[in-house]
Amino acid sequence: MQKYDVIIIGGGAAGVTCALSAHTIYPDKTIALIRKEKVALIPCGIPYIIHSLNSVEENILPDELVTKTGADLIIDEVIEKEGKTLKLKSGKEVGYDKLVIATGSVPLLPPIQGITKEGIFSVKKDYEYLSHMRKYAEKCQDIVIIGGGYIGVEMADEFIKNGKKVTIIEMLDRLLPTTMDREFGNKAQEILESQGIEVIVGHRVNAIQGDKKVTGVVLDNEKEIKADMVLVSAGARPNVTLASGFGLAVHPRNGIWVNEYLRTFDKDIFAIGDCAAKYDFFTGNFSNIMLASTAMAEGRLVGSNLFEIKVMRKFIGVLGSFSTKIGNTAFGTSGLTEEKAKEMNMDYIVGTATTTDRHPGKLPGASKLFLKLTFSRYSHTLLGAQIYGGDSVGEMVNMFSVMILNKMTDMDIDNLQIGTHPLLSASPIAYPAINASVDAIKKWYEYRKK
Amino acid sequence: MQKYDVIIIGGGAAGVTCALSAHTIYPDKTIALIRKEKVALIPCGIPYIIHSLNSVEENILPDELVTKTGADLIIDEVIEKEGKTLKLKSGKEVGYDKLVIATGSVPLLPPIQGITKEGIFSVKKDYEYLSHMRKYAEKCQDIVIIGGGYIGVEMADEFIKNGKKVTIIEMLDRLLPTTMDREFGNKAQEILESQGIEVIVGHRVNAIQGDKKVTGVVLDNEKEIKADMVLVSAGARPNVTLASGFGLAVHPRNGIWVNEYLRTFDKDIFAIGDCAAKYDFFTGNFSNIMLASTAMAEGRLVGSNLFEIKVMRKFIGVLGSFSTKIGNTAFGTSGLTEEKAKEMNMDYIVGTATTTDRHPGKLPGASKLFLKLTFSRYSHTLLGAQIYGGDSVGEMVNMFSVMILNKMTDMDIDNLQIGTHPLLSASPIAYPAINASVDAIKKWYEYRKK
């Protein structure tokens, strides 16, 4: 029986990152990554197989990422564990010293009548499934998307470019409802509608019509919408089946229990990525945010700490940092939204700024940019940032994550030395991070006077 | 005589920002900004008046920025000071309680024989002068730029777009020599040369040819280059004339002496921006870096602390954070270069990463991105970042400034939760900040083994 120092189960973002990190920190250890899929996909690239990419092939995560480090890539499925030996579907057995579970998540299918009809798809990270879906979509004309989170919105944006008639149905009262505040959800809706997408918020799908194949959906207000394809993007649940079989503590909705080092109750088994329980950065409560950025941060942390705690590096909780692009407008968010701050009964101040992202604004390529920052009124620390604007939003949001992690205050941000350039950013006088902080400072002084 | 609570002398980036900040923090105080120029310009936009903008008008910093806060904008020149009264060129007198000097800098003209001939220009922040230069350039064909810093490089990039024959002459051994390492200077040179610009490094201009008008320049190797226009972009010196007349401590090259609150020896007089002495963030030594980003950070700090020290906010020294765009490639830098770290005898480790800034790289709009991070070997803190790549470099460099200011280590960065998106950024697996940090960590372990 082959024995490895480290075995990682799962070839997604978390697993691959963990393998790379383990190789960097422990170059002499033997590492295997076991994956049941023949090919792995770039998770966040999946919506773009519809239009922006020419095929699912163009979205493959190359195996060389893993194998070039000298790690073994085993295409097989882990069935059970006995002591420190894993039994595989092929009949083979492999031993480990340290085990990392990165089995990801599975799309949630809401309990709607008729949800299993032909023509109904979810977003599985599966090459064959997605290739089939891509081909199937070619023949379809009326596409209904259930769920207006970022996958739903991105898919809608892709389908409309292919000339489909697209309807998004979101049961909450706006698009992107769990990650961004109302003004951002409304902005996303405005852009999608301007492209000809129908957006329905505040309604559920009650039933799916059609015999074998889907022909339409019926909403809770009895409205019927024609559909020859339905895409369900209504969230995901952690894939804990294997971990549960191993006897680890799991929760069907929250995932595999792990501590701040992503260690399970078994000291030689770690869990990372979508399958592992997530804790909110601010409250420490369970979080249902599943993002590649979180998964990979966990993968790198576990990769570094497998055999010894190299540095006191703990996972500090899910920040929820993400970006997307709808039409020509990029959206980004990190940390708390105002709505979440309210839910938590936090005492907060909001600062906003509107600017153009080139200066002078007459330069070609300038986009309007809107930024909303949420600060603690008491400590002045930055709690969250939300932005829409040009493509540079994609990196700006990471700057805000770094600010939140470092507990920077409005005054710290006001004090920043920011590099700006006419062709690349807002004017230094209108630099949004600073101006939104100044707006918050102004409001604090106004509040103090009262 | 009119008396103001605050008078700011100078209408550039520092002065305007200070006025805005003072208004925010002390809304009840009366503020005047005295400026001798009829119109103010956006400093970093100046190179772009040549081609990207249609006129100098399009690069005007609007007066409303100042006046809409209720501050008075006085177009006049301060001649002298008696007690707390300023005498203006027009004969008027104005009194102040707090005075802020923001008189900026003047371009350095190297002592080259013939430097005052017709057709020789420097980059003055002066509307009439630049309008004349723009018009003059229209008739010219052969343009020589003395100085390969970022203004020289940006102007070259603009002139070539207007179909001129352009030569840049830099006396040091590469372009952008004081702010970026060799590989970045070389990359800038490669891009400029591919556009047809001639780049000469490691040589000085010894003489300027022509009778009244310039006809060419002669280098220190006796090479002659034809020129009907010469643009000198060889740095600037602080404009300390007025401050010197006020009896403040000044140094002709380093500027007006100020402490960490930007206060001069006179407790009611502050100096900010290019005219104020600058201290290096790392060493505390005098720094000759003059940037709008620094000037405005100083302006905001002084604006907040004019009447009382609101928060213990000190100016922490010049970080040197800037970005530019050459051809289609953006360049950014913040903190120490490797060369500077070497000069200071710092014990450092360099980590690098190369990636594309979209993922998968087959998506439209993807650019190659190269990042170089310099860390302290002992403390692991980030000392500097240099990048070239697509437009998002403009915001990425600010993320690195925030990391440097917060003394983040390679492990801290490796641990980050980074938002990425196919259409906006590198893949999370190839995210450059993380991968360059991992590269540095790898090198540290290799070094430790030795």
Image: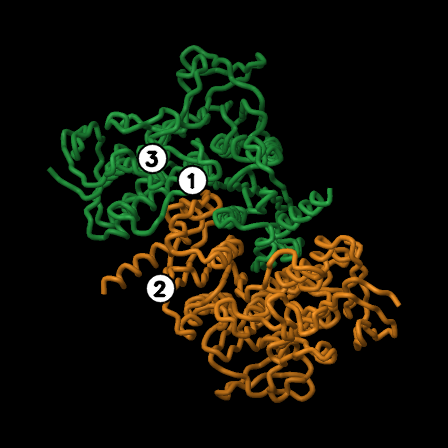
Chain colours: A orange, B green
Q: Amino acid at mark 1?
A: Gly
Q: Residue furthest top?
A: B211
Kind of residue sitting beneath label 3: Val
Which secondary structure lies at badge 3? Answer: loop
Mark 3, chain letter?
B
The residue that mark 1 highlights is B317
Mark 1–mark 2 CB contact (< 8 Å)? no
Residue hosting label 2 = A377
Q: The numbered mark 2 sits on a residue in which chain?
A: A
Label 1 to label 3: alpha-carbon separation: 12 Å
A267 left or right of B126 in image: right
Q: Is residue B420 above or below residue A81?
A: above
- Is residue B373 visible to the viewer in this orientation of the structure? no
Alpha carbons under labels 1 and 2: distance apart: 28 Å
Residue highlighted by disc 3: B258
Q: Position of residue B140 (x, y in %)?
A: 46, 24
- Is residue B94 shown above or below B147? below
Q: Circle 1 sits in a helix, a strand or a loop, which is it?
A: loop
Considering the image in quadrants, where does the N terminus of chain A appear? Answer: bottom right
